[in-house]
Amino acid sequence: MLALIAVLAFAGFVALGTWQVERRAWKLDLIERVDQRVHAPATAAPGPAQWPQVNAANDEYRRVQATGTFLHDRETLVQASTTLGAGHWVITPLRQADGTIVLVNRGFVSPERREPSTRSADAPHGTTTVTGLLRLTEPGGGFLRRNDPAGGRWFSRDVQAIAAARGLGQVAPYFIDAQADPPASGSAQRWPVPGLTVISFPNSHLVYALTWYGLALMVVGAAWYVGREESRLRRSR
């Protein structure tokens, strides 16, 4: 009975270790693909005909461009925590020439810049081209915090919910994180601050794999020890 348990435990630990090795290979491939997208030349943001095919595997963090007019009166502030501190993302609809809308994360503002009047001088007007990273919608809310459209409290960039709350029309199922332009020499800080996208993929699969394989070896060692002791007891009788 103990032998059967040992065999099952060994097989289980080896299977888990192998699964982590496969996950590590998948994660490394993902990191490489995302790095290529981030540094590739910008392409046109997917249009309505392409919206149903937009997905994380093929499009997340792809550099894209969109041209249109910002609807500043319909911006949405989403809670954010960045290297500049706590504050908000400024999510502004961009109406394109065909009438469709794509939400643009124009960047971060500190709490004292929450009101549009404190940063209106930096707001782009007229036809504007935005370059940035395509990001997928973040439905629902943040960790343990649900979005509250009626109360104007947003904890995630939920494209569909924001579009409904702002009465927008045909909206892309993604948003664009605007990239930062090189600052002009001696220029004052402009708000919002773009280019704060954090691209990080935890990759501890090798540690997990070694842990599972280590446990498998411990099972082998324990089985060998028990077998040796049983053999010794049988010889001593």
Image (cartoon, rainbow, N blue to C red):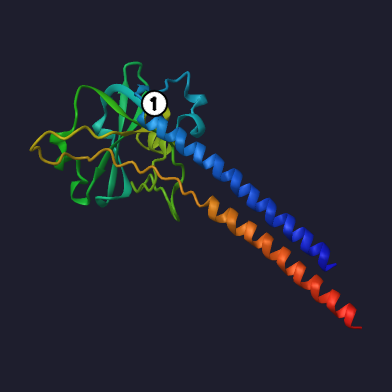
Q: Nearer the viewer, residue 52 or 99?
A: 52
Residue at image coords 14%, 43%? 118
Q: Is residue 42 above or below residue 195?
A: above
- Residue 218 higher or lower than 205, as above or below: below
Q: Which residue corresponds to the image point at 16% horizontal and 35% vertical from the top-left? A: 183
How many C-alpha atoms fall within 10 Å of the one at disc 1: few (<14), some, or many (≥20)?
few
Q: Is residue 54 left or right of residue 92?
A: right
Residue projecting furthest to the left:
186
Where in the figure is residue 73, as x and y percent of width and height?
24, 33
In this picture, residue 180 sits left or right of residue 233: left
Q: Does any portion of residue 135 appear in the rendered image?
A: no
Occupied quadrant, residue 138 = top left
Q: Which residue is mark 1?
A: 169
Element at label 1: loop
Question: What quarter of the picture does the N terminus occupy?
Answer: bottom right
- Work out whether 220 lies above or below 198: below
The furthest residue to the top: 98
Q: Quadrant of residue 174?
A: top left
In the picture, measured across the screen, residue 34 lies left or right of residue 70, that is: right
Percent position (x, y) of residue 194? 26, 38
Q: Amino acid at mark 1?
A: Gly
Residue visible at 19% across and 40% down? 191
In-front residue for pair 64/217: 217
Q: Is 23 displayed left or right of 123 in the figure?
A: right
In this figure, what is the number of numbered marks? 1
Q: Quadrant of residue 237?
A: bottom right
Residue 207 vs residue 187, the one in the foreground: 207
Residue 205 drawn at (x, y percent): 54, 50
Task: Tell me residue 49's x, y (percent).
Answer: 47, 18
Viewer-proximal residue, 153 or 212? 212
Most extreme residue toward the right is: 237
